[in-house]
Structure formats: C-alpha cells, structure tokens
Amino acid sequence: MTNTGGRRRPPTIHDVAREAGVSRGTVSRVLNGGHYVSPAAQEAVNAAIRRTGYVVNRHARSLITGRSDSVGFLLTEPQEKFFEDPNFNILLRGCTQALAAHDIPLLLMLAGTEDERRRITRYITSGHVDGVLLVSSHSGNPVAEELSEAGVPLVACGKPIGLGSKISYVAADDREGARDMTRHLLSLGRRRIGTVTGPLDTPGGVERLAGYKEVLAEAGIEVDDRLVVSGDYSRLSGEKGAERLLAQVPDLDAVFVASDLMARGVLTTLERAGRHVPEDVAVGGFDDSPAALASSPELTTMRQPFDRISAEMVRVLLAQIGGEDTAAVILPTELVKREST
Amino acid sequence: MTNTGGRRRPPTIHDVAREAGVSRGTVSRVLNGGHYVSPAAQEAVNAAIRRTGYVVNRHARSLITGRSDSVGFLLTEPQEKFFEDPNFNILLRGCTQALAAHDIPLLLMLAGTEDERRRITRYITSGHVDGVLLVSSHSGNPVAEELSEAGVPLVACGKPIGLGSKISYVAADDREGARDMTRHLLSLGRRRIGTVTGPLDTPGGVERLAGYKEVLAEAGIEVDDRLVVSGDYSRLSGEKGAERLLAQVPDLDAVFVASDLMARGVLTTLERAGRHVPEDVAVGGFDDSPAALASSPELTTMRQPFDRISAEMVRVLLAQIGGEDTAAVILPTELVKREST
DNA sequence: TTCTCTGCTGTGAACGCTCCCATACCGGCG
DNA sequence: CGCCGGTATGGGAGCGTTCACAGCAGAGAA
C-alpha cells in the first residue's frame, strides 16, 4: 500500500491497468466477478490492485450503473419511541452488520416530521439508495405506500396494516406468540387472565390481542371485556393499564402484556398494590428485551428473534433489488420462562 | 412533479436547461448558490426544476468535485455496549438530525472486530465520506490515529486519550461535573462519600474521578483508597462496586457513581443490603440517561448535554471539512436533583 | 470612438468507471 | 481449407455533473 500520509490523488482503474500491463476493460472485468479473464491476467490485476492500494470509486461506478450500492434505514416513528424501544437498536445493529457483509453501507434516515418525510422521500425516490428498510410499527404510514408505488425496493419490519398493499415485510409471529404465552399462563392454572395490548393501529397490537382471545375462547373461558385494556408500548401505559385492570377485575391472577416495557409498568403497579408476582398475579411480557432481565422479578416473555429478523430483512431487500419477487417472512417466537410466572 | 408511477429515466440537468431555455452552466450555477445568474434566469431555472421534479445526481457531482457530501458515524465499541448505553442512541439521533439540516446523509458504521475495522478504514480513507464522527470512549483506539493521519476530517465524542494527538473532539466537562456532584453530596452533610468510577482507560473515567478527589481534598476530607472502586459503566459493575464499597466502608453515607447505569446497580445492591436511599446513603449518578428516571428512587445525576454535543460535533466536523482548523469544545454539565439525594 | 471592467451566459473538457463492440486467438468440424 | 463458437482482450463512448474558459453585452472612463 503506497500513498501513506498526505492527501495524494488516489489510484484509478487506469493506474491499475498500466501497472498490470492490461487494459481498463480487463481490470473492470476482474473487479466485477472475473468472467472472461485469463488466470494470468486475473493474477496480474490482483497483484497490481494490492500494490497500488486501489479502491473502486463508487461514485463513478454508480453514475454509470444507476445503482448506488447503498440502502436506507428509514425510521418514521416520532423520535421518542426510538429511544424507549430497545428493539429498534437491535434491529439497526443487525441490519448494519448484515449489510456490511455485502459491503453495502447503511444510510440512517429519520423522518419524524412531515417536512423531513418529504425531503427524504424525494431523496430516496431520486435513486440515491437502492432500497429501503422501513421501521415503523404504526400504520397509516404514507411513506411506505409512496415509496412502494414509486417502485423503490422496500422491506418493512412488521406487517404494514395498509389495505391490500403489496409491501414485503418480515415479522415475528405475533399471533402464535400471544397464543403460546396465553397457553403458558393457562397451564399454570390461571383463569382470570387480563391483557394490556399494544396500540390497536399496529399489527403487533392487533395480532397479539387476537392470539390471546383465541386461546381463551378455545379453553372455554369467557373473554371478558374488562380483562382487556390497551396501551401504547410505553412503560407508563403499562402502569395505567394495570391500575385499570385491578380496578375492573380485582381477582385478576395473570396478565399478558404486549411488550416488556409495558410489563415493567405492570409490575410497578402490582407491587404498589401489594400483589406478589408471580404468586398472586403471573405476568408475561413480549419481546425479550433487555428490560425483561432488568426487572425484578425477571420477566417471563416471548422472545422475538430480532437477529433473524434483521438478517431476513436484508436478505429480502437484496433479493428485491436483484429483481426477484419477494413475499412476507414470518418468524417464530420463543417462550422464555423467568421469574414472573 | 411529472414521472409518477413506473420507473422512468429521471430528469437531468440537461432537461432542466432545455425546459428553462438556458444552458447547463446556468442551471449548475443556480444549483450551487446562484452567483453570476440574472434574476430572470434564476427564476426560470427554479420553475423548470419544480416542473420537471429534478433532483441532482449526487454521484455525478461527487465524481467531479471529489466530495461525497456524506459523513460517517463510526462506532468502535464492542457491540454490546452500544445497547447498554442509551447515550449512543441520543448522540446518533442528534447527529442524524443536525446533518439532515445540511442535507447530508449519515452512514452508520460499526467496527467491532479487527476485520471490520480494516474494511471500514479502507472505505473511509478512499474518500467515500467527507468526514467521520467517531464515538468510542475507550482509548488506545488505532482507528482515530489512522484516520487522522490519513487526513480524514474527524471529530471524536469525548477526549481521545492518545498522547499529543491533534484530534478534535467535543465533550462534556467531566471534571467540573464530578466536582459539582461531589460538592452537592457534601452540601447534604455527607462525609463518607465513596465513588464507583468509570473505566480508567477512558477520559470520562479519569476526569470524573479527578473531580471527585479534588473537591474532597479541598474540603479537607481525607481521600481514602477504600472509598474508590472502579467499574466499566455496566449495571452489573455498579452492583459489584457497591458491594465492595459496603464491605470496605460500612459507614458509607453517599456514593458518586460515574454513570447512571452503574448507579442503578448501586441502588440494587444498597436495597439488598437494607440501606435506604437517600436516608442512609445518598446516590449521585452521571449522564441523566433515561435510566435515571426509570430507577426507584429516581436518580440525582449530572445532565450531559447530548443534544448540544451532537450539534457541536456536526458543526465542528463541517468546519473541518470546509478546511478550517478546529479545536476541542467542552460543554458544561448540569446538576439534576431527584429523589436519590 | 476605443478600451476596460463587470455581470452574465454558453460550451468543451474532464471526473473514473462500465458497457458494448470490434478484434484476435484457438480448437474442432464439415 | 474455410468456418464456426467460445474465450479473451483492447478501446471508444457515454453516464450527469462541475469547472475553466471564452464570449458578449452594456456602462463608464480615456
């Protein structure tokens, strides 16, 4: 590697060609898979690349190929949620790494306000990224539709609620997860099982509630309206939710909470009310976020496979960029038993 | 805005020129500040841009200017820390927003392993970003030196410990913050004040310890070695640290903890030991992270102005990219009194 | 008038790459 | 022998921009 220290003009494909005694074309072919290149030339070019410290100029390449070899990670949540929810971070990390394995940089984009959203939509649709990983649990999200209609490859995390949209997504099996957790609570002998749902304009909120109701119905237990209160995934809404549950159903013996963060709020309220967990009331969360371990007692929860979700999102997006038709991917959740049940 | 639906060739500067009845050059001048352009032409071009939905092709621009109009956000911590520490997220968000205001995308880069570090260094030094925001509290970080020597504009968050390095950085005033907190504990009448430090190979760890010691010395209190234990900013290390403190100094009446996360660990240990906070032992944290509010009792802490830090990092980096010489920026911290003292 | 200066405009080069076409070689087949 | 298909290579064209330069008009000075 030459060119130590000071800012010199970086080597171009020309320099490599000269150094290797071949033409630009041959170097380019080596760079792009090495088809129609003799082993001798192949070797000479690779040596020359090593000697010159050549790195392809992605701008020049993008200019002609029309691809940018980068993807956007778009967050359309209002900002606060980003920080309250550890899942975003895990997802972000997973996606960055999965993309790095393909040598694709990730552009982080936040579109909290309407203004930002317009700017970013414009940026994306004008070809500055090859595709978009969309993280936004809330529905009614115009960005997804816009981008999708503009033909931008797009993969969402979680099912977009938009009616009949053909947007690919990767999600955990919320309904089955909720079913498993509810069955688990039943298997402990609990019968007065309440739930604190997520926001009902999100697929996660809807599906988890559905799973809960299904299992209770199958077990022949009346699904009492007073057993169901809804939250917004925040800790505080967990506290409030539990207060309402206790008021409406004094003989409550278990709660299925649609997120760990809310579950922590539920624990707080139960403790304040003098109910022991899990003796008096069993509590099951959802996500297996760090919050689940940080609480006391540690939360029983449904583990969402975020590492696999991010890997799948990247895989599906790259396939879509490659021109394949892609479908939804649903990944199974896993019950993690801890102290709270 | 034409070009709805299907994938058409996006308009180029040529199309805009034709539409506006001027030349490429004039359009380009409008795009880049509008100097030497008559008001009439200016107006015609802007109208044409609006009509065609033109967006500049950044690849073509970068190819000739040599700038990429994007910056990297480089994280060299081992991965886990990223998630344990809420500060990173706040920083990331702040930087993304500050950059967005300049229409500069942020490329997120994780370099946890040696391999990744080489790849990313290579990527950066070959001009794919104009500058780097570096987040890595630990010292002995070769990346910073490498990039800096290669002439890449670089701003670190927190002071890099590297000897005599000329790297610009933005940091909170750790020492003064520690002094304030220690004074606060003294003002409550506490005299057996322990501390759980951060890692002593980080500037934050060192400075906060120094501030603590200074104030005790100034108050004429002997700085007992047994009062000082060190942690690694993790919650667990806070628990362990507090255990050691209690063992070594049974009559402990206050603890200054170098991070909120560790402070939560300290609270856990104190509760287990039956010590009441703040009655028996006052606890002061550092960061004012969400963890400070989530704990019970809520933590008194030193607020680090992360919003201003990220804004300053971006400002300094852009100045550096613009060719200015830049220096370090130190921002004041602020005492936030809550229940734990 | 003539010359200069200033504001504004158009145009031919690049920038570094990939694409495509022309060419050349080789072995095998009719 | 001529012709073919497959492999390998070189080089021109062009991607969409900015930059440098040349040119032109009009105002003011000589």
Image (cartoon, coloured by chain):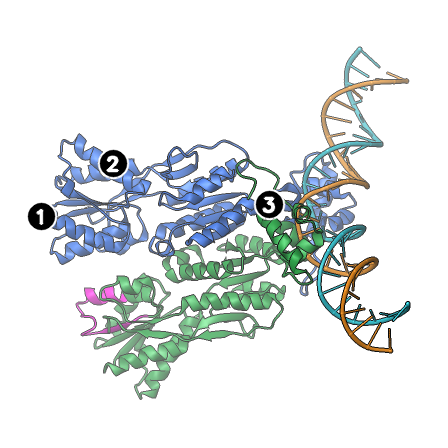
Chain colours: A blue, B green, C cyan, D orange
Q: Secondary structure at mark 2?
A: helix
In this rendered view, identify the residue nearer to me: B174 or B248. Answer: B174
Q: Does residue B280 belong to the magenta stretch?
A: yes
Residue B227's image quarter? bottom left
- Image x and y of residue D8, in percent: 75, 34
Question: As drawn, is A324 to the left or to the right of A90?
Answer: right
Q: Which mark is residue A250?
A: 1
How many neighbours does mark 1 have within 10 angstroms: few (below 14), some (14-19), or many (20 or more)?
few
- Image x and y of residue A324, in percent: 52, 32
Q: How many marks?
A: 3
Q: Which residue is mark 3?
A: B52
Looking at the image, residue B225 lies above or below residue B313 = below
- Image x and y of residue B234, in percent: 35, 62
Q: Which chain hosts label 1?
A: A
Q: Which mark is residue A211?
A: 2
Question: As drawn, is B93 to the left or to the right of A336?
Answer: right
Query: Of the residues shown, which amino acid type is indicated by label 2?
Result: Gly
Residue segment shown in magenta: B266-285
- Can marks 3 and 1 be said to lie on one chain? no
Q: Which chain hosts label 2?
A: A
Which image quadrant: the N terminus of chain A?
bottom right
Residue B179's image quarter? bottom left
Q: Are marks 3 and 1 in contact (CB under 8 Å)?
A: no
